[in-house]
Image (cartoon, rainbow, N blue to C red):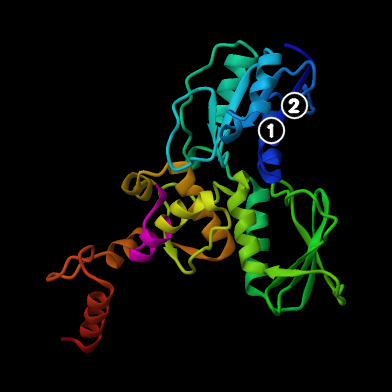
Amino acid sequence: MKSLFRASILGLGHSEVVMIRQHVAEILAGVSVDWVSANHESLDFLIVNSSFINASSVQNLLRNNNMPVLLANHSSSQIIADKHTITLPLLENTQLKNWIHEIVLNEQVVPFKPVKLQDSVITQVLLDNAKVFEYFSTTSEGLLYLSDQCGAVGIIDTSNQLMYLFPERKVPVDMQGLLTYERVQNLPKTYKSIDLLQWLWDVAWFEPSCSVLVSPDQFIKLKVWPQPSRETDRKDVLQMSARLAQGVTCAQDMAEELKIPMLRVQHFMSALVMVGFGERQTQILQKSAVLPDKAVNDEEATGLRRLLLGVRRRLGL
Protein backbone atom coordinates (compact mmCIF):
# COMPACT_ATOMS: atom_id res chain seq x y z
CA MET A 1 0.00 0.00 0.00
CA LYS A 2 1.13 3.55 -0.68
CA SER A 3 2.31 5.56 2.32
CA LEU A 4 0.75 8.81 1.04
CA PHE A 5 -2.54 9.52 -0.73
CA ARG A 6 -3.53 12.86 -2.22
CA ALA A 7 -7.27 13.47 -2.24
CA SER A 8 -9.76 16.28 -2.66
CA ILE A 9 -13.40 16.99 -1.79
CA LEU A 10 -15.41 19.26 -4.07
CA GLY A 11 -18.79 20.98 -3.60
CA LEU A 12 -19.63 19.96 -0.01
CA GLY A 13 -20.20 21.99 3.14
CA HIS A 14 -17.59 22.38 5.84
CA SER A 15 -19.21 19.99 8.33
CA GLU A 16 -19.59 17.34 5.61
CA VAL A 17 -15.95 17.73 4.56
CA VAL A 18 -14.79 17.33 8.17
CA MET A 19 -16.97 14.24 8.59
CA ILE A 20 -15.68 12.57 5.41
CA ARG A 21 -12.06 13.34 6.26
CA GLN A 22 -12.50 11.75 9.68
CA HIS A 23 -13.94 8.58 8.11
CA VAL A 24 -11.14 8.44 5.52
CA ALA A 25 -8.56 8.78 8.30
CA GLU A 26 -10.13 5.81 10.11
CA ILE A 27 -10.30 3.70 6.94
CA LEU A 28 -6.70 4.50 5.92
CA ALA A 29 -5.31 4.27 9.47
CA GLY A 30 -1.53 4.40 9.49
CA VAL A 31 -1.40 6.06 6.06
CA SER A 32 -0.94 9.78 5.41
CA VAL A 33 -3.70 11.55 3.46
CA ASP A 34 -2.84 14.93 1.97
CA TRP A 35 -6.01 16.94 1.28
CA VAL A 36 -5.27 19.17 -1.69
CA SER A 37 -7.19 21.26 -4.21
CA ALA A 38 -9.25 19.48 -6.88
CA ASN A 39 -6.96 20.66 -9.68
CA HIS A 40 -3.85 19.07 -8.15
CA GLU A 41 -1.80 17.32 -10.83
CA SER A 42 -1.60 13.93 -9.06
CA LEU A 43 -4.82 13.16 -7.22
CA ASP A 44 -5.33 9.59 -5.99
CA PHE A 45 -9.09 10.07 -5.65
CA LEU A 46 -11.77 12.76 -5.72
CA ILE A 47 -15.03 13.03 -3.79
CA VAL A 48 -17.53 15.41 -5.39
CA ASN A 49 -21.09 16.57 -4.75
CA SER A 50 -23.28 14.64 -7.19
CA SER A 51 -25.22 17.83 -7.99
CA PHE A 52 -22.05 19.36 -9.47
CA ILE A 53 -20.90 16.40 -11.56
CA ASN A 54 -22.31 17.83 -14.82
CA ALA A 55 -20.81 21.28 -14.33
CA SER A 56 -18.39 22.21 -17.13
CA SER A 57 -15.55 22.90 -14.69
CA VAL A 58 -15.95 19.46 -13.10
CA GLN A 59 -16.21 17.72 -16.48
CA ASN A 60 -13.03 19.45 -17.65
CA LEU A 61 -11.30 18.33 -14.46
CA LEU A 62 -12.33 14.72 -15.02
CA ARG A 63 -11.25 14.74 -18.66
CA ASN A 64 -7.79 15.98 -17.72
CA ASN A 65 -7.26 13.59 -14.80
CA ASN A 66 -7.59 9.82 -14.72
CA MET A 67 -8.55 9.15 -11.10
CA PRO A 68 -11.25 7.36 -9.08
CA VAL A 69 -14.28 9.59 -8.45
CA LEU A 70 -16.83 9.09 -5.67
CA LEU A 71 -20.14 10.95 -5.78
CA ALA A 72 -21.71 12.30 -2.58
CA ASN A 73 -25.51 12.33 -2.76
CA HIS A 74 -27.80 14.17 -0.33
CA SER A 75 -30.82 11.95 -1.12
CA SER A 76 -30.47 10.31 2.27
CA SER A 77 -34.05 9.05 2.45
CA GLN A 78 -33.27 6.32 -0.03
CA ILE A 79 -30.58 3.66 -0.19
CA ILE A 80 -28.29 4.07 -3.20
CA ALA A 81 -26.96 0.80 -4.60
CA ASP A 82 -24.30 2.36 -6.85
CA LYS A 83 -20.91 1.50 -5.34
CA HIS A 84 -19.50 4.79 -6.66
CA THR A 85 -21.94 6.86 -4.58
CA ILE A 86 -22.15 7.58 -0.86
CA THR A 87 -25.18 8.93 0.96
CA LEU A 88 -25.00 12.05 3.13
CA PRO A 89 -25.07 12.60 6.02
CA LEU A 90 -22.47 9.85 6.42
CA LEU A 91 -23.83 8.06 9.50
CA GLU A 92 -21.42 5.15 9.11
CA ASN A 93 -18.55 4.48 6.72
CA THR A 94 -19.48 1.17 5.07
CA GLN A 95 -20.12 2.67 1.61
CA LEU A 96 -16.99 4.80 1.77
CA LYS A 97 -14.85 1.97 3.13
CA ASN A 98 -15.96 -0.47 0.42
CA TRP A 99 -15.26 2.09 -2.31
CA ILE A 100 -11.79 2.94 -1.02
CA HIS A 101 -10.79 -0.71 -0.63
CA GLU A 102 -12.22 -1.84 -3.97
CA ILE A 103 -11.59 1.16 -6.21
CA VAL A 104 -8.68 3.08 -4.66
CA LEU A 105 -6.73 0.21 -3.09
CA ASN A 106 -7.91 -2.50 -5.52
CA GLU A 107 -8.58 -4.90 -2.67
CA GLN A 108 -11.33 -7.48 -2.40
CA VAL A 109 -14.22 -6.22 -0.31
CA VAL A 110 -15.47 -8.43 2.51
CA PRO A 111 -19.29 -8.47 2.67
CA PHE A 112 -20.49 -6.15 5.42
CA LYS A 113 -22.62 -7.52 8.22
CA PRO A 114 -24.46 -4.85 10.24
CA VAL A 115 -23.56 -4.86 13.92
CA LYS A 116 -26.31 -4.17 16.43
CA LEU A 117 -25.56 -1.87 19.29
CA GLN A 118 -25.90 -4.63 21.87
CA ASP A 119 -23.05 -6.45 20.08
CA SER A 120 -20.74 -3.44 20.33
CA VAL A 121 -19.67 -1.13 23.10
CA ILE A 122 -20.82 2.46 23.54
CA THR A 123 -17.75 4.54 24.21
CA GLN A 124 -17.47 6.15 27.61
CA VAL A 125 -16.81 9.47 25.86
CA LEU A 126 -20.26 9.36 24.22
CA LEU A 127 -21.93 8.60 27.54
CA ASP A 128 -20.03 11.39 29.30
CA ASN A 129 -20.83 13.91 26.56
CA ALA A 130 -24.50 12.91 26.71
CA LYS A 131 -24.48 13.81 30.41
CA VAL A 132 -22.89 17.16 29.55
CA PHE A 133 -25.63 17.87 27.00
CA GLU A 134 -28.29 16.92 29.54
CA TYR A 135 -26.73 19.33 32.04
CA PHE A 136 -26.66 22.16 29.49
CA SER A 137 -30.34 21.70 28.63
CA THR A 138 -31.62 21.44 32.21
CA THR A 139 -29.48 23.72 34.37
CA SER A 140 -29.92 27.48 34.86
CA GLU A 141 -26.74 28.29 36.75
CA GLY A 142 -25.38 31.10 34.61
CA LEU A 143 -22.52 31.22 32.11
CA LEU A 144 -20.44 28.19 31.10
CA TYR A 145 -17.25 28.29 28.99
CA LEU A 146 -17.30 25.25 26.65
CA SER A 147 -14.22 23.59 25.13
CA ASP A 148 -13.45 20.42 23.20
CA GLN A 149 -10.27 18.71 21.98
CA CYS A 150 -9.86 21.40 19.29
CA GLY A 151 -10.07 24.33 21.71
CA ALA A 152 -12.65 26.89 22.79
CA VAL A 153 -16.18 26.53 21.39
CA GLY A 154 -18.20 29.30 23.01
CA ILE A 155 -20.07 30.48 26.09
CA ILE A 156 -23.41 29.01 27.13
CA ASP A 157 -25.94 31.19 28.94
CA THR A 158 -27.91 28.47 30.71
CA SER A 159 -30.27 30.95 32.39
CA ASN A 160 -31.59 32.20 29.06
CA GLN A 161 -30.81 29.03 27.03
CA LEU A 162 -28.55 30.86 24.60
CA MET A 163 -25.28 29.83 22.95
CA TYR A 164 -22.55 32.35 22.07
CA LEU A 165 -20.17 30.72 19.59
CA PHE A 166 -16.69 32.17 19.32
CA PRO A 167 -16.42 33.75 15.83
CA GLU A 168 -12.84 32.49 15.41
CA ARG A 169 -14.04 28.89 15.79
CA LYS A 170 -13.97 27.36 12.29
CA VAL A 171 -14.47 23.62 12.87
CA PRO A 172 -17.43 21.61 14.24
CA VAL A 173 -17.57 20.40 17.83
CA ASP A 174 -15.40 17.32 18.33
CA MET A 175 -17.84 14.88 19.94
CA GLN A 176 -15.34 12.03 19.76
CA GLY A 177 -13.34 13.73 22.49
CA LEU A 178 -14.50 14.69 25.95
CA LEU A 179 -16.29 18.04 26.29
CA THR A 180 -15.23 20.26 29.18
CA TYR A 181 -16.79 23.37 30.70
CA GLU A 182 -16.21 25.85 33.48
CA ARG A 183 -18.16 28.73 34.98
CA VAL A 184 -17.33 32.27 33.94
CA GLN A 185 -18.57 35.66 35.09
CA ASN A 186 -18.60 37.81 31.96
CA LEU A 187 -20.00 37.53 28.47
CA PRO A 188 -18.46 39.51 25.56
CA LYS A 189 -21.17 41.85 24.31
CA THR A 190 -20.01 41.67 20.69
CA TYR A 191 -20.85 37.96 20.32
CA LYS A 192 -24.10 36.94 18.64
CA SER A 193 -26.35 34.43 20.36
CA ILE A 194 -28.28 31.46 18.99
CA ASP A 195 -30.86 29.21 20.61
CA LEU A 196 -29.06 26.74 22.88
CA LEU A 197 -31.41 23.77 22.39
CA GLN A 198 -31.36 24.18 18.62
CA TRP A 199 -27.57 24.30 18.68
CA LEU A 200 -27.36 21.16 20.86
CA TRP A 201 -29.72 19.34 18.50
CA ASP A 202 -27.68 20.32 15.43
CA VAL A 203 -24.45 19.11 17.04
CA ALA A 204 -25.95 15.73 18.01
CA TRP A 205 -27.74 15.29 14.66
CA PHE A 206 -24.80 16.28 12.44
CA GLU A 207 -22.18 14.21 14.28
CA PRO A 208 -22.03 10.48 13.30
CA SER A 209 -20.44 9.47 16.60
CA CYS A 210 -23.69 10.43 18.39
CA SER A 211 -25.75 7.90 16.44
CA VAL A 212 -25.43 4.90 18.77
CA LEU A 213 -26.47 6.33 22.14
CA VAL A 214 -29.80 4.49 21.82
CA SER A 215 -30.00 0.83 20.81
CA PRO A 216 -32.22 -0.19 17.87
CA ASP A 217 -34.71 -1.97 20.15
CA GLN A 218 -34.97 0.81 22.75
CA PHE A 219 -38.42 2.44 22.94
CA ILE A 220 -38.42 6.24 22.86
CA LYS A 221 -41.04 8.82 23.82
CA LEU A 222 -41.04 12.21 22.06
CA LYS A 223 -40.99 15.26 24.35
CA VAL A 224 -40.00 18.09 21.96
CA TRP A 225 -40.20 18.25 18.17
CA PRO A 226 -36.72 18.98 16.72
CA GLN A 227 -36.44 21.63 14.02
CA PRO A 228 -34.34 20.52 11.01
CA SER A 229 -31.76 23.12 10.03
CA ARG A 230 -30.92 21.50 6.68
CA GLU A 231 -33.49 21.30 3.93
CA THR A 232 -32.29 17.78 3.06
CA ASP A 233 -33.26 16.60 6.57
CA ARG A 234 -36.70 18.19 6.70
CA LYS A 235 -38.76 15.35 5.24
CA ASP A 236 -37.22 12.56 7.32
CA VAL A 237 -37.05 14.51 10.60
CA LEU A 238 -40.65 15.69 10.40
CA GLN A 239 -41.84 12.25 9.35
CA MET A 240 -40.04 10.53 12.22
CA SER A 241 -41.22 13.18 14.71
CA ALA A 242 -44.82 12.78 13.58
CA ARG A 243 -44.60 9.03 14.03
CA LEU A 244 -43.23 9.37 17.56
CA ALA A 245 -45.94 11.91 18.38
CA GLN A 246 -48.50 9.13 17.75
CA GLY A 247 -46.90 6.84 20.33
CA VAL A 248 -43.55 5.53 21.48
CA THR A 249 -41.66 3.07 19.32
CA CYS A 250 -38.11 1.84 18.64
CA ALA A 251 -35.73 2.47 15.74
CA GLN A 252 -36.16 -1.03 14.32
CA ASP A 253 -39.94 -0.72 14.09
CA MET A 254 -39.92 2.86 12.85
CA ALA A 255 -37.39 2.10 10.11
CA GLU A 256 -39.55 -0.75 8.83
CA GLU A 257 -42.73 1.28 9.05
CA LEU A 258 -41.44 4.50 7.43
CA LYS A 259 -38.97 2.84 5.00
CA ILE A 260 -36.11 4.99 6.31
CA PRO A 261 -32.64 3.43 6.80
CA MET A 262 -32.41 2.01 10.32
CA LEU A 263 -29.09 3.76 11.08
CA ARG A 264 -30.68 7.11 10.28
CA VAL A 265 -33.65 6.39 12.55
CA GLN A 266 -31.31 5.20 15.31
CA HIS A 267 -29.29 8.40 14.98
CA PHE A 268 -32.49 10.45 15.17
CA MET A 269 -33.60 8.75 18.38
CA SER A 270 -30.10 8.96 19.88
CA ALA A 271 -30.01 12.72 19.19
CA LEU A 272 -33.45 13.13 20.77
CA VAL A 273 -32.32 11.46 23.99
CA MET A 274 -28.96 13.24 24.03
CA VAL A 275 -30.56 16.70 23.84
CA GLY A 276 -33.54 15.88 26.07
CA PHE A 277 -36.08 16.03 23.23
CA GLY A 278 -36.92 12.39 23.92
CA GLU A 279 -36.71 9.89 26.75
CA ARG A 280 -36.29 6.14 27.04
CA GLN A 281 -39.40 4.07 27.75
CA THR A 282 -40.05 0.45 28.64
CA GLN A 283 -41.86 -1.85 26.23
CA ILE A 284 -44.76 -2.08 28.69
CA LEU A 285 -45.33 1.65 28.48
CA GLN A 286 -45.12 1.50 24.71
CA LYS A 287 -47.83 -1.13 24.47
CA SER A 288 -50.20 0.77 26.71
CA ALA A 289 -49.48 4.02 24.90
CA VAL A 290 -50.52 2.82 21.45
CA LEU A 291 -53.58 0.69 22.34
CA PRO A 292 -56.41 1.95 20.12
CA ASP A 293 -59.91 2.72 21.39
CA LYS A 294 -62.30 -0.18 20.85
CA ALA A 295 -64.63 1.95 18.77
CA VAL A 296 -62.15 4.07 16.85
CA ASN A 297 -58.81 3.11 15.30
CA ASP A 298 -56.16 5.69 16.26
CA GLU A 299 -54.74 5.79 12.74
CA GLU A 300 -58.13 6.80 11.34
CA ALA A 301 -58.99 9.33 14.03
CA THR A 302 -58.52 13.01 13.36
CA GLY A 303 -56.92 15.30 15.93
CA LEU A 304 -60.35 16.47 17.10
CA ARG A 305 -61.66 12.94 17.45
CA ARG A 306 -58.62 11.89 19.51
CA LEU A 307 -59.14 14.90 21.77
CA LEU A 308 -62.78 13.96 22.37
CA LEU A 309 -61.78 10.39 23.12
CA GLY A 310 -59.31 11.62 25.73
CA VAL A 311 -61.99 13.76 27.37
CA ARG A 312 -64.39 10.79 27.45
CA ARG A 313 -61.78 8.57 29.10
CA ARG A 314 -61.03 11.15 31.80
CA LEU A 315 -64.74 11.59 32.56
CA GLY A 316 -65.26 7.82 32.64
CA LEU A 317 -67.83 7.87 29.83
Mark 1 closeness class: few <14, some 14–19, many ≥20 residues within 10 Å: some
Please, is residue 36 above or below residue 278 in the view? above
Residue 34 image point, x, y percent: 80, 25
Residue visible at 67% across and 56% down?
A: 129
**Amino acid found under the numbered disc labelled 2:** Ala
Residue lying at the far bottom in this picture: please name it: 315
Residue 247 image point, x, y percent: 34, 64
Residue 70 image point, x, y percent: 60, 25
- Per the rendered image, the range of residues in magenta is 240-251
> Which numbered disc covers residue 227?
none
Q: The N terminus appears in which quarter of the rendering?
A: top right
Q: Is residue 45 left or right of residue 211?
A: right
Residue lying at the far front in this picture: please name it: 56
> Which numbered disc covers residue 10?
1
Please, is residue 183 above or below residue 52 in the view? below
Magenta run includes residue 152: no
Question: Which one is in front, 160 or 227?
Answer: 227
- Residue tagged 2: 38
Q: Is residue 4 left or right of residue 9?
A: right
Question: Which one is in front, 248 or 119?
Answer: 248
**Amino acid found under the numbered disc labelled 1:** Leu
Residue visible at 56% across and 36% down?
A: 92
Q: How many marks?
A: 2
Please, is residue 315 above or below residue 118 in the view? below
Earlier in the chain: of badge 1 and badge 2, it is 1
Residue visible at 42% across and 64% down?
A: 221
